[in-house]
Amino acid sequence: MAEFKLRIRRFDPESGQAPYWDEHTVDLEPHRSVLEGILQAKNDTDGSIGIRCSCRGAICGSCGVRINGQPGLACHKHLGDALASSENGVIDVEPMGNMPVIKDLIVDMDAVHWKKVQRVTPWLINKEPIPEREYIVSRESMIDVTQTAACIQCGACVSDCLSMEVDPLFVGPAALAKAYRFIGDPRDAAHQRRLKDLAEDEHGIYTCTHCFKCIDACPKGVAPMNQIMRLRRIAGNDHAIEDRNNGYRHEHAFVKNVERNGLLHEADLLPDSYGGKFHPRAVPELVGSLPAITRALLRRKVTLSKALLHQHKAPPGVKQIYETVEGRDERVELNLYITGRDEDNE
Amino acid sequence: MPAHDVLIIGAGLAGQRAALAAAQKGATVAILSKVHPVRSHSVAAAGGINAAINPADDWRSHAYDTVKGSDFLGDQDAIEIMCRDAPAEVMHLEHIGVTFHRNETGEIDLRAFGGASMKRTAYVADITGQALLHVLYEQIMKHHEVVDRYEEWFVTSIVLDDAGSCVGAVARNIRDGRMETFSAKNVILASGGAGQCFKPTTNALICTGDGIAQAYQAGAPLMDMEMIQYHPTTLAENGFLITEGARGEGAHLLNSEGERFMEKYAPNKMELASRDVVSRAEQTEILEGRGVGPDGTGIWLDITVVPKKRTLEALREIVNIGKDFAGVDITKEPIMIQPGAHYIMGGVKTDVDGATPISGLYAAGEVACVSVHGGNRLGANSLLDTLIFGRRSGEHAAARAAGMPMPTASEDTRKRDERMIAGILDRPKTGRRISAIKDELGTTMNRHVAVYREEDGLQKAHEVVRRLKDEARTAYVDDKGTIFNQDVLGAIELDYMLDCSEAIVIAAIERKESRGAQFRTDYPGRNDEEWLKHIDISRSSDDTPEVSYSPVTITQWQPEERKY
């Protein structure tokens, strides 16, 4: 047994008081979960501590919280590990972000998370005719969508999504992972419609900024950001959807820019996103962004020579990466459930 | 006052399936649950769902395996219905989007499971319950116009009219503490089992026997309550479930001498005998000194014999559970397990349409006892039970609703329950803590009402339960608020658990033989002459359980010696 100090962020909506920190000392082995710590405090000292929880084993998705600022399930974090990541020997537990707090560690998931799930038409739209028995589909396709079906809707990825913080209307990591669950499913008849919908939405798949926070947060290996990137590849490459938000061209401009320069040449990126410096679409965009460019110059974030004359050229190693990846017959997509090789089976 | 043709309490697989079925038949439907539907405990079912979908299989074989698994206590008419309907139900699930694992030709793959005479279990890795629950919830979202949802509402009572028919329920909105009476032509209880009466247990914290106790309080009989399934593979420390799918994929059970001891107990089926048989074998090894671990109360489950790629693909969840909750890499070393409380075969007595003897009151899923599981449930039959009898009760309730006027539930029950809650909030600080009472209950049940039982222990358990019932009346709560007051709900749940526990203990004392999950060391044999019958428990006027019996329905399989 060992003693752990928990500092729980409390909020009583009926008190008229602001949120406050409430410290409890619990006595448990270090491999016991933060949830067990909270429940010990709740059971032995203060039954009014509010936290949703049920399965205790990272299956039901009830106990999403922030521990020392990191989102995740309270039942899925060992006290010992939480202590190691704490700043001053006290484990901080707070409600998740990006969602309104109802009481203590309980947030309003309906107001944010479930609305966004609803947004992606979260049910299978069957390919017709529906067979009498099961649809005949490949083993890999079902294993593939099972990665996103493994999402337990805990909201940890939503909690710290940076894009959602900036754009509260962003569909977000959990709902877009759910969208992949149908778009990756060969039994679904609406792939094109779903992709077009989410690509054309200005709060859709191109709003994600690749910050990786949702991948870190997810307790089930769903890797929402990877699913969003797959949606982009499928929308742009397989369904030729060039969205009005310019997301698709912008992403390609990145890829081509790095292929050419090895390092990102930002001055080219914007015009490239609109079809090159001399493309009619690019001119108004360039003119429109002049104030931003001027500010950057004045603040010495960029210099004129660096902006206009990018000397760096991609070394052969970078070219090789492009040749290897683009030379493949099929895109290789990483998947949670398909791991290892058959030879590993001894 | 909200009023619906069909009011469903509980939003796990049985509740959601009932809601969709009733709505499809044109009824106005509401589904009410104390947690968000996807948090329901169906989410934890791992291994799969049984159905004779292989053309070489036959539903009668599935039915016979189920009858034998039940130790001939299951009602064969109900078992026949469940097994005959199973293939169509699995195909329905596939059509609405469940990502069942496929074989090399793209058809639904099947895995081996305990007590089954052939591979018959369709699965989604080892998250089958989650996969099913989330897909059903997708359908509930799709059909939101015809299924009203009351998420995070806690039921305190079922409401009967003067004639004794069920006409609604009283519930508290957890979000703001408001109490509401719901009128309904029919109420379907689908609120799951009572695993929290035991400690440790594989069951979630929400499994507090609410529906069983509510029906019991309303006067409905409970059946087969003595039949508590101890799952053979649960983590010693916290009771977490290690799926039977592991043994289905070929994992071995080993004692301290490294023996595959199941050879002695079930030479044909080995690790894939019925759960009661395997749990007893493990317990015997432990009692005879061949257990493993520091205090010799464990058994090794060796999954390393399963090819690693297969483990990572089909047993992903237990790889995580081993890593996160036991510090064990199951692909490299054996993991220590022991039998643990898992499932209640008994529950609210119903017919094959889910109807209870109270008109207008239905029950489906773990809360109910049809009885398709009898003395022992086969693995992967519980998901099937929830769906088949969830659907049947939804359809039957919708049909019943079509021919009757909407009743108006009296507000008296709500007023009574409001006073009850005010009383809980007013209790002086001198009482015991709810958690302390719950802890003593769980530990007592797990000691005396477990794999092996005998008269003295059961009587002791009964005394403790009676005393705890008294103590629960004065148990103190800290939270006096209205918004998300989980403390006061905990006090009510404790009462539910105590009602369930008392019924379990009384039934276990009553059955003086050994059958299925009930093994009496003082009556070690099965006694068909006297005990081939169900034990029913009803609440008497002075709040004590009353015992009666009902016959077992036998259609085509006469009781015979049970060997695996």
Image (spheres, rainbow, N blue to C red):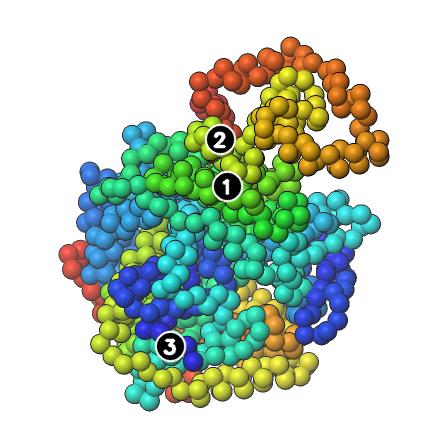
Query: Which residue corresponds to mark 2?
Result: A236
Q: Are marks 2 and 3 on the same chain?
A: no
The relative height of residue B15 versus residue B488 in the rendered view (above or below) is above
Q: Secondary structure at mark 1?
A: helix
| Residue sitting at the far top | A316
Say the numbered circle drawn on residue A200.
1
- Give the CA distance from mark 2 to mark 3: 49 Å
- Give the CA distance from mark 1 to mark 2: 12 Å
Residue B43, horizontal then vertical, whole percent: 45, 53
Pointer 1: residues within 10 angstroms few (<14), some, or many (20+)? some
Residue B357, horizontal then vertical, whole percent: 28, 76
Which circle, 1 or 2, is nearer the viewer?
A: 1
The kind of residue tagged 2 is: Gly
Q: Quadrant of residue B77?
A: bottom left
Subunit of mark 1?
Answer: A
Quadrant location, the N terminus of chain B: bottom left
Residue B31, horizontal then vertical, whole percent: 40, 66
The kind of residue tagged 1 is: Glu
Give yes or no for contact between labels 1 and 2 (Cβ–Cβ under 8 Å): no
State left or right for residue B341 relative to residue A139: right
Most foreground residue, B180 or A254? A254
Looking at the image, which residue is at 36% across and 84% down?
Answer: B408
Most foreground residue, A277 or B464? A277
Query: Which residue corresponds to mark 3?
Result: B3
